[in-house]
Image (cartoon, grey):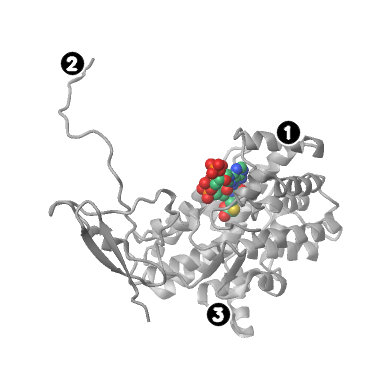
Amino acid sequence: MSKQTLTITDNRTGQSAELPIEHDTIPAIGLRQLKVQADDFGMLAYDPGYTNTASCKSRITFVDGDRGILRYRGYPIEQLAEESTFLEVAYLLLFGELPTAGELSDWTARILSHTQIHENLVDLLKTFQAGAHPMGVLISAVAAMSTLYPEAKQVNDVDNRLLQIWRILGQLPTALAFADQNRLGRPRTDPRAGLDYSANFLHMMGLTRQADGEVDPVLVRAMDVLFMLHADHEQNCSTSALRNIASSEADPYCAVAGAAAALYGPLHGGANEAVLRMLAEIGDTKEIPAFLDRVKNREVRLMGFGHRVYKNYDPRAQIIKRVAYEVFAVTGSNPLIDIAVELEQHALEDDYFVSRRLYPNVDFYSGIIYQAMGFPVEMFPALFVLGRTPGWLAQWVELVTDPEQRIARPRQIYLGEAERAYVPIGERG
Ligand code: CMC
């Protein structure tokens, strides 16, 4: 068997370093032995945006971006979207195995027993002004929960961790639905016993769509599938933010709030909202070529396209496209779907996108479904948060139980001024 090492020669000095290779990776700290002077700090790896840096060993989610593969704990996303449910997937992500019937019913009951939110949180949510963006409200709500459950600081206590996980999964949909109803000046709709996770959320959002006030089962299933598709995606921007925060042993509410803040940006989970606004701005399929010219001239980005990892069709986008038509059978079509489908076709035939391997991602079609279901556009990134929360929590548990993890603390290349003396204000030019 060949030697599992990498030898690097520093041509400044002729010095070599032999580094062990494990899982096609070298330990970055091994570079530090390369020095010109004995008192040098040693060599660092420079990697803005962490494009080629593994920050952890994980057993949760596998993504093969070249082949368009996504698996949670080994199970293909296509099978989970077809056969599973959101809470079952949450269990799978957190505990590593599909639950037995008894485990699933206990897990579901635990989470659904935590759907009521604390009255202090209700009061806080009422203080946001009309029109407040749901992401700012949701981030504040999760952070505020840390003040209501101070025992959450005991991050190394297994039972305590589980209690916070039930609370976060149970309460987030209620807080979000309440914030939305409050924003619209409507009375809050309390969670209803007997409804499952997605049905209860749609009920609290008032998106029932049936004359008898019951939630349409097609929409419940669509919501559940959308949540499952968003449930984890290994070390993306928000998950990395969560791991960074949690590495200091901050409580999970603050860590989830920070992850949600990272998700909010339009290059990440805010893209679903941005796609809808983009499609509305294009307005007509006739305008697509002119819009794509603007993209190619780098005036705007084609939102919902491209991915740091997928250089192939995002498997989640394939499933979402199918779900869109199932939802339209209940809600009636969303006229923006025609623009989206044609926009995708144009882009996939255009050398700009082909040569850069840019394909639709999870956000390209999801917003069209959310809008057809009746969600306001600014709510879309918050729906991504609800779906992603089990993944964040699974990554949190993996981090705090991993003996190799330490507080996150990257290095920098300092290019600023060398030491200089302070100049009193009267002497500055
Ligand atoms: N529209 C136009 N050009 C693009 C796009 C796009 N959406 N995405 C990438 N490119 C170009 C980019 O300009 C660059 O071209 P060049 O090499 O000529 O400078 C090349 O493709 C490589 O792009 P990059 O910006 O270096 O890629 P990245 O890995 O840093 O960024 C991304 C990934 C997702 C931020 C980016 O593709 C993007 O901004 N997409 C639009 C926003 C979006 O849909 N985000 C959702 C991502 S999926 C859900 C999630 O997990 O958040």
Give, as a three-letter code, the residue at label 2: Glu
Give, as a three-letter code, the residue at label 1: Ala
Residue 126 placement: quadrant: top right
Q: Nearer the viewer, mark 2 or mark 1?
A: 1
Between 114 and 361, the one nearer to me in the picture:
361
Give, as a three-letter code, the residue at label 3: Glu
Quadrant location of the N terminus in the rendered image: bottom left
Closer to the chain start, of discs 2 and 3, is: 3
Whole-number angstrom distance, CA of label 2 to CA of label 3:
68 Å
13 displayed left or right of 165: left
Q: Are marks 3 and 1 in contact (CB under 8 Å)?
A: no
Q: Which mark is residue 97?
A: 3
Q: Is mark 3 within 8 Å of ligand 1?
A: no
Circle 3 SS class: loop
Residue receiving disc 2: 427
Q: Residue at x 49, y 49 (%)?
A: 262
Q: Nearer the viewer, mark 3 or mark 1?
A: 1
Q: Residue at x 78, y 36 (%)?
A: 283
